[in-house]
Image (tube, rainbow, N blue to C red):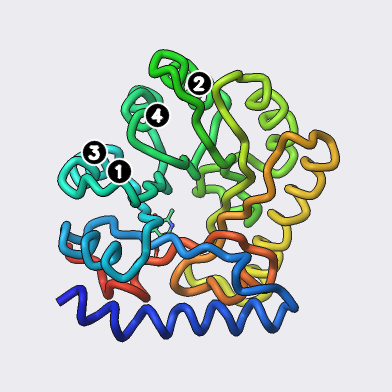
Amino acid sequence: MYEARLRETLPRVREAMAEAATRAGRSPDGVRLVAVTKAHPLEAVRAALGAGLIDLGENRVEELEWKRAEVDDPRARWHMVGHVQSRKAPRAAQLADLIHSVDTVKLARRLDAAAEALGRDLAVLVQVNTSGEEAKSGLSAEEAVEAVHEVLALPRLEVRGLMTMAPLGAGEAVLRSTFGGLRETLERLRALDGRVGHELSMGMTEDFGIAIEEGSTMVRVGTALFGRRPQ
Ligand SMILES: *Cc1c(COP(=O)(O)O)cnc(C)c1O
């Protein structure tokens, strides 16, 4: 079922991504598609890999753990896109190739210690709440400057860039200010410290076109690829 679905949905998603990049005068090659398989069965993960989608996103450490073990495909790059509780930092550090959701310095410290214990370096994005929504996790743009400075001092973490989530159902103006705000925050951070990477993880099913127009380098797409998540 997932294989057949992806044959339909993947070309459409890729085309919409390419069109958004072109509208913004960007190369479509500059935007990576992370297939968010959370809550879908293993069949979805296997179908994604079969279709060449090697960047896979999960939002729970437990689910990442069992899917990664079951699939056991060396091509796969696993993205942790959801909130990570500090006590789960050791497992997240072991399982994820990129953690998008570092939303406190405390979590960053835990991940760094875990990575040190594993003898590996760990790529992370710092999650910033540029929409101003109270309920969303992530640092404010002002806090992010100081936080990124502290995260850069952690020897095992590599700050590849920033991540944000737009409010659900937001209109175009809010989306543009959320995504454009993240891009501006990253530009400021990179001007302060050249070790900060250029990645902007922003854009989901409902808003990836605008996110790409605003500079996204990584969109995290679930529903548009795999359909509604099973309950
Ligand atoms: C679920 C999720 C996505 C994918 O959402 P869709 O709307 O299904 O594309 C992207 N990012 C995060 C952090 C998520 O939790």
Q: Secondary structure at mark 3?
A: helix
Say which amino acid is labelled 1. Arg
**Which comes sooner in the sequence, label 4 or label 2?**
4
How busy is the neighbourhood of tag 3: few (under 14 within 10 Å), some, or many (20 plus)? some
Residue at label 4?
Answer: 93
Are the residues flagged by discs 1 and 3 in contact, CB closer than 8 Å? Answer: no
* Foreground of the two, 171 or 59: 59
**Which comes sooner in the sequence, label 1 or label 4?**
1
Query: Which label number is shown at residue 112?
Result: 2
Q: Secondary structure at mark 2?
A: helix
Residue 194 falls left or right of residue 15: right
Say which amino acid is labelled 4. Ala
Q: Nearer the viewer, mark 1 or mark 3?
A: 3
Name the residue rendered at 62%, 46% in the picture. Answer: 162
Residue at label 1?
Answer: 60
Say which amino acid is labelled 2. Asp
Query: Which label number is shown at residue 65?
Result: 3
Name the residue rendered at 50%, 84% in the picture. Answer: 15
Q: Quadrant of ligand 1?
A: bottom left
Quarter of the figure with the N terminus: bottom left
**Which comes sooner in the sequence, label 2 or label 1?**
1
* Foreground of the two, 74 or 117: 74
Q: Position of residue 163 (x, y in %)?
A: 57, 50
**Which comes sooner in the sequence, label 3 or label 4?**
3
